[in-house]
Amino acid sequence: QVQLVESGGGLVQAGGSLRLSCAASGTTFSINAMGWYRQAPGKQRELVARIGSDGIINYADSVKGRFTISRDNGKKTVYLQMNSLRPEDTAVYYCNSYRTTWNGRPLDYWGQGTQVTVSS
């Protein structure tokens, strides 16, 4: 069974930094695309950053230049370094693991989420 466990959230002042971690188990981590999503109160869940098994990275426009996603396949962990945080970054941040099987079936897993609160 796949498990994704996030950590590193918390309360920080605007302009500060946080580093989120997501440890995976029960999956062949290196072949999965890993992503960070967030959901603010009253809003839809949105992609923050994604890193493919090939290392290709995508960022939401709102976090480009401030956030950095990385992965350590040996530790089965994906990270999100968040700098220059803004109050609008306040949300629950979720880790996601995704790949498809040989016959195209999606394997899509989510962590429980970690709260990030940025005070002004």
Image (cartoon, rainbow, N blue to C red):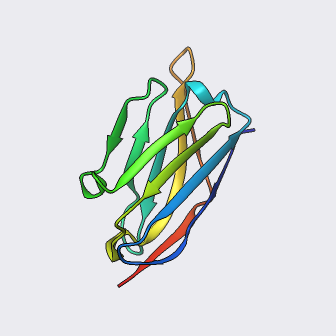
Q: Is residue 58 above or below residue 12?
A: above
Q: Is residue 58 above or below residue 91?
A: above
**Closer to us: 49 or 46:** 49
Task: Measuring from the top left, give residue 46's x and y in whole percent.
Answer: 37, 55
Q: Residue at horizontal 53%, vertical 45%? A: 96
Residue for point 50% across, 20% down: 104
Q: Is residue 71 above or below residue 102?
A: below
Total marks shown come to 0
Q: Is residue 77 left or right of residue 120?
A: right
- Horizontal side of 56 relative to 78 (left or right) equals left
> 106 or 70, which is in the foreground?
70
Q: Position of residue 99 (x, y in %)?
A: 52, 29
Left/right placement of residue 104 relative to residue 83 reads right
Residue at the bottom extreme? 120
The C terminus, quarter of image: bottom left
Q: Nearer the viewer, residue 109 or 117?
A: 117
Q: Quadrant of residue 88?
A: bottom left
Q: x, y percentage for residue 65?
A: 28, 52
Identify the residue at image location x=28%, y=51%: 64
Residue at far left of view: 61
Q: Position of residue 50 (x, y in %)?
A: 41, 41
Quarter of the image for the N terminus: give it: top right
